[in-house]
Image (cartoon, grey):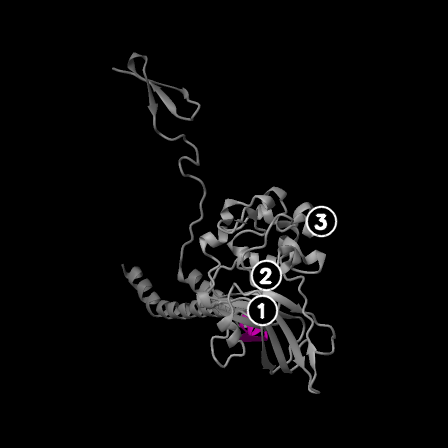
């Protein structure tokens, strides 16, 4: 009779079996542990009418009130929008849109009167909106040099190849380089309140506090870390092709100039969809007794610098208040209401089916 004997485990946990002639055979049987033998304790839910039906009703009863609250909150946000693209002959900006191009060095000005039917309380946020502008294009998103925007001197003088063909002009580096910076929105929007006595009162617009804190203080920095003499810092560089002035002349405020200009920072955060809005200005509430924007007539003055006809785009100006959930967006409330309603409806349907056929099945099992 041929005999074999077991030896100790190998380092990898396998058991070796000694065969005839001194050879060894490896046993492929897994080690006798709870993990390898799949004996770990597990929980497997058993779906019964007593557990499924209450779950559907509870989800419905929770989601529907939340959805109603979100929807009502969104509807309470006041929002006013003006399309000033100028593609219609009756539009005040028609002549500007028709004759303006990227090669123009002088802006075209148009005025748009409008009326607010209700007062706007608390802080009011002014946005500009663009349509049919695909900031999510892969090559467009990559066309930037984050090291240059972070204030690196070497990247300032020698931009990344990702910025091509907007990296240099006549062997002089572009600052800031790339397609995103080159296409920066540069319309100037000014708001006036037409007082009942006939005078136009300019609405003070705040240009700071519109960018993310991390963008302003971490991702974007001026070279050498100083704002005192940006002209000297950017010497030897040229402005982007479509810009009317260099980056060190974006603002007179040294804390909002150069790469840390908040209009520039907001634009550099690309949008995910072709129709988007970006924060332009904030209208701060000054008097607790009076509304920020009272009901009445207003005038929007637009310095038309940004042509959109080449890509069949549209431009908008939006005035909006906000709530604890942000800007006006009814989608989240509608989604909660829809999910809650579907769950509640399914609960009712399953309850009827269980009530109608559940007792019959129990009786059949008992007889069997």
Q: Say left or right for 17 vs 177.
A: left
| Quadrant where the N terminus is found in the figure | top left
Q: Percent position (x, y) of residue 291?
A: 69, 78
Give the magenta-colored segment's residue range: 69-83
Q: Percent position (x, y) of residue 311?
A: 44, 65
Pick the front one: 291 or 96 = 96
Query: Could one spot residue 322 in this view of the protein?
Result: no
Q: CA distance from mark 2 to mark 3?
A: 24 Å
**Residue at 41% across / 35% down in the picture?**
36
Q: Say left or right for 229 vs 186.
A: right
Q: Quadrant of residue 38?
A: top left
**Residue at 54% across / 48% down in the picture?**
170
User: Label 3, on which residue?
Assistant: 226
- Asked whether the residues under the numbered discs 1 and 2 touch, taking CB atoms below 8 Å apart as contact, a structural biologist would say yes
User: Label 2, on which residue?
Assistant: 244
Q: Quadrant of residue 305?
A: bottom right
Of mark 1 and mark 3, the one earlier in the sequence is 1
**Residue at 42% across / 39% down in the picture?**
39
State whether residue 15 is above or below residue 245: above
Q: Percent position (x, y) of residue 344?
A: 44, 69
Does the magenta segment cover residue 79? yes
Question: Mark 3 falls on what kind of element?
Answer: loop
Query: Could one spot residue 9 in this view of the protein?
Result: yes
Q: Say left or right for 72 vs 355.
A: right
Crowd around label 2: few <14 · some 14–19 · many ≥20 (10 Å) = some
| Quadrant where the C terminus is found in the figure | bottom left
User: Label 1, on which residue?
Assistant: 107
Q: CA distance from mark 1 to mark 2?
A: 10 Å
Of mark 1 and mark 2, the one earlier in the sequence is 1
Crowd around label 1: few <14 · some 14–19 · many ≥20 (10 Å) = some
State whether residue 358 is above or below residue 202: above
- Asked whether the residues under the numbered discs 2 and 3 touch, taking CB atoms below 8 Å apart as contact, a structural biologist would say no
């Amino acid at each position: 009779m041929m005999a074999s004997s077991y030896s100790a485990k190998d380092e990898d946990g396998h058991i070796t079996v000694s065969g005839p002639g001194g050879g060894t055979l490896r046993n492929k049987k897994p080690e006798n542990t709870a993990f390898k033998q799949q004996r770990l304790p597990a929980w497997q839910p058993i779906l019964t009418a007593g557990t499924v039906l209450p779950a559907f009703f509870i989800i419905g009863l929770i989601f529907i009130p939340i959805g109603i609250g979100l929807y009502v909150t969104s509807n309470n946000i006041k929002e006013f929008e003006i399309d000033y693209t100028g593609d219609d002959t009756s539009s005040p900006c028609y002549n500007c849109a028709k004759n303006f191009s990227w090669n123009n060095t002088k802006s075209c000005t148009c005025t748009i009167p409008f009326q607010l039917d209700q007062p706007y309380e608390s802080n009011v946020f002014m946005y500009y909106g663009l349509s049919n502008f695909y900031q999510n294009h892969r090559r467009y998103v990559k066309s930037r040099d984050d090291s240059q925007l972070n204030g690196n001197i070497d990247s300032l003088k020698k931009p990344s190849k990702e910025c091509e063909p907007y990296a240099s002009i006549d062997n002089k580096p572009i600052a800031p380089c790339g397609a995103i910076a080159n296409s920066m929105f540069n319309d100037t929007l000014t708001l006036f309140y037409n007082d009942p006595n006939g005078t136009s009162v300019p609405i003070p617009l705040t240009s700071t506090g519109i960018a993310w804190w991390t963008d302003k203080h971490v991702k974007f920095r001026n070279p050498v870390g100083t704002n005192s003499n940006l002209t000297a810092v950017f010497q030897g560089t040229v402005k982007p092709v479509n810009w009317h002035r260099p980056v060190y002349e974006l603002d007179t405020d040294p804390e909002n100039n150069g790469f840390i200009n908040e209009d520039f920072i907001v634009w550099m955060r690309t949008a995910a969809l072709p129709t988007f809005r970006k924060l332009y200005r904030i209208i701060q509430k000054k008097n607790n007794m009076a509304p920020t924007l009272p009901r009445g007539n207003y005038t929007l003055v637009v310095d038309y610098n940004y042509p959109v006809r080449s890509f069949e785009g549209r431009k908008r100006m939006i005035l909006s208040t906000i709530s604890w959930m942000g800007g006006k967006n009814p989608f989240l409330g509608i989604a909660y209401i829809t999910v809650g309603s579907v769950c509640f409806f399914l609960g009712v349907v399953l309850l009827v089916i269980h009530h109608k056929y559940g007792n019959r099945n129990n009786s059949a099992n008992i007889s069997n």
